[in-house]
Image (cartoon, grey):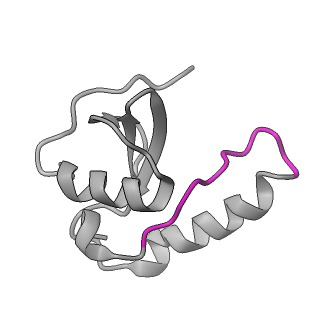
Amino acid sequence: MIDQTRAVRAGEELDVEKLRGWLERALDARGAVEIEQFPGGHSNLTYLVRVGKDEYVLRRPPFGSKVKSAHDMGREFRILSKLAPVWSKAPRPAAFCEDESVIGA
């Protein structure tokens, strides 16, 4: 089963302009930015971000979360970066943003 995206849930919106600027700097991704959300899952929030013809999956901790160890996106990025080259089914991370001013996490 493949999870279908939907409109972003109220209260879980991302600042499109801040994200667009970061994507340009980090990935040289240019073009109109469209964001949808994957509704499944029970922990970290997952979005589909389209920039021009390219698509990215963006993950972030839930809003208001204070338990950093439970939602450690840096750890997820590091593990997937090592796993992707040796296991074809693992997603290939593109970039990691440590600047909380971009998406609030």
Q: Residue 34 falls in which quadrant of the image?
A: top left
Residue at far left of view: 10
Which region is colored magenta? 86-97
Instruction: Pinpoint residue 88: horizontal percent, then vertical percent.
Output: 82, 40
Residue 9 in sight: yes
Residue 15 in sight: no
Q: Quadrant of the C terminus?
A: bottom left
Instruction: Pinpoint residue 62: horizontal percent, then vertical percent.
Output: 30, 61
Q: Is residue 79 left or right of residue 31?
A: right
Q: Is residue 20 left or right of residue 71?
A: left
Q: How many marks?
A: 0
Q: Quadrant of the N terminus?
A: top right
Q: Residue at x 34, y 61 (%)?
A: 22
Q: Residue at x 71, y 61 (%)?
A: 81
Q: Is residue 73 left or right of residue 51?
A: right
Q: Is residue 71 left or right of residue 14?
A: right
Instruction: Pinpoint residue 38: horizontal percent, then vertical percent.
Output: 37, 35
58 is higher (above) or lower (below) than 68: above
Q: Residue at x 41, y 79 (%)?
A: 68
Query: Magenta stretch: residue 98 in it?
Result: no
Instruction: Pinpoint residue 57: horizontal percent, then vertical percent.
Output: 47, 43
